[in-house]
Amino acid sequence: MVILVTGGCGFIGSNFVRYVLEARKKAKVVNLDLLTYAGNLANLEDVQDVFAGRYHFVRGDVADKGLLKQVFEQFGIDWVVHFAAESHVDRSILGPEAFIKTNIYGTFHLLETCRQFWSKSPRGENAEKRFLHISTDEVYGSLGRTGFFTEGSPYLPSSPYSASKAGSDHLVHAYFHTYGLPAMITHSSNNYGPYQFPEKLIPLMINNAKNGLPLPVYGDGKNVRDWLYVGDHCKALLAVLEKGTPGEKYNIGGNCEKENLELVNLICDYLDEKLGFNQDRSRKKLIRFVADRPGHDRRYALDTAKINRSLGWKPEVVFEKGIRQTVDWYLAHSGWVENILDGSYMEYYQEQYGARLNGR
Ligand code: NAD
Ligand code: DAU
């Protein structure tokens, strides 16, 4: 079994590569990653040694069809797990073009390559092929105070990021429908855990709170996200690959809704407990309400009955434990964080927060 993982040097991809190599001793992984600002070889530093012979890294663009052809010829790919994407809503608002290139063109070229290679396989062999497209709950748009998105909910994406993911989902569906490509789509809620790039909410708040820096909460802080531990997500993805039905979609959620402000307060409380107060004051005093994200979705929540019923998956990690483990991981890996906080990241930070934190 040879698995092509795209975007394996990012947050969820790197957790998945490590998980699948441990869980399936016969699996081989080819990780294709462009190493954008979000991709980090250090996320898989140990994997090359521990899984020697079963792990291969290729640096490149998922939208490079020549390279995809080479990878398929060289490795004979059985499964594709497609994580590679521009993934940050705020960056998509600052500059949407990269999102269209990677998320839509990248997915298109990957689908085309699979179609070409897998249709050449002798009759019957395609039964073992799988294309798993990692999508998001954000394609469904925003919810009011009540209700849940099901796999049948209409698409109503509101940011350039979610619109580009929706576009890629439609292509995947069309390749199943038109060409019979054995593709499946998963829609996951907000992940948290080790190796998340420190510009997303949880690692950003941990790092700033640890260092006594302002904690920028958008709008009134009452937007709701459903938090899923990344390890639980990886288990769900393997279940979909092994037991899911081509052509189907599966919601993967944590059944753990939290308002942003509640979450930031929790992180402050835990850091105060672990490290003591910051200059004699609780870290909650660092919270600053800043200008809202344009088009900010109010609430996401997923109905996960389908994956629970059909594949027997449900989230295992309780949030209160998972968030403590995550804070502990970031405190223990301060070198990993510091290596990321280089010039290019600080440029983004200044553009995103400079005016907001100065009250403009
Ligand atoms: P991430 O930003 O941490 O990682 C993305 C990875 O893709 C990086 O390693 C980057 O170098 C790579 N990449 C980007 N453009 C590429 C290209 N053109 N060619 C090859 N590689 C490229 O993202 P993440 O948070 O790990 O998310 C992974 C996937 O899961 C994305 O598709 C995202 O839409 C989806 N998702 C994420 C979450 C979440 O909470 N993080 C939730 C639901 C869905
Ligand atoms: O829902 C799944 C999505 O979750 C994924 O598809 C995306 O790839 C992933 O980035 C994530 O998107 P969000 O926009 O929900 O995540 P983010 O961490 O950027 O923000 C979480 C919430 O916190 C959101 O309501 C915005 C808010 N926020 C975020 C930042 C970075 C703040 O209030 N302040 C901040 O500084």
Image (tube, grey):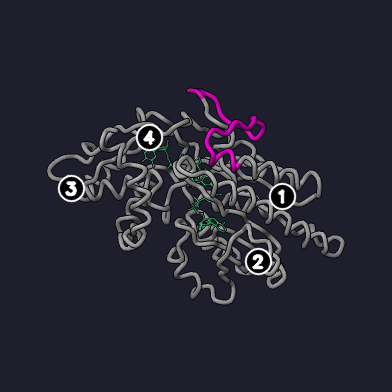
Q: Nearer the viewer, mark 4 or mark 3?
A: 4
Does the stretch in magenta take in 340?
A: no
Circle on res. 260: 4
Q: CA distance from mark 4 to mark 3?
A: 23 Å
Q: CA distance from mark 4 to mark 2?
A: 41 Å
Circle on res. 67: 2
Q: CA distance from mark 1 to mark 4?
A: 34 Å
Q: Closer to the N terminus: mark 2 or mark 3?
A: 2
Outermost residue, right direction?
Answer: 123
Taking depth in this image into account, of 314 and 158 the one nearest to the observer is 158
Disc 4 within 8 angstroms of ligand 2 (CB) = yes
Could you tell whether 193 is left or right of 304 in the image? left
Q: Quadrant of residue 63?
A: bottom right
Q: Amino acid at mark 2?
A: Leu
Q: Nearer the viewer, mark 1 or mark 2?
A: 2
- Looking at the rendered structure, the secondary structure element under dot 3 is loop
Q: Which residues are magenta?
A: 144-165
Residue position marked by numbered label 3 in the rendering: 276
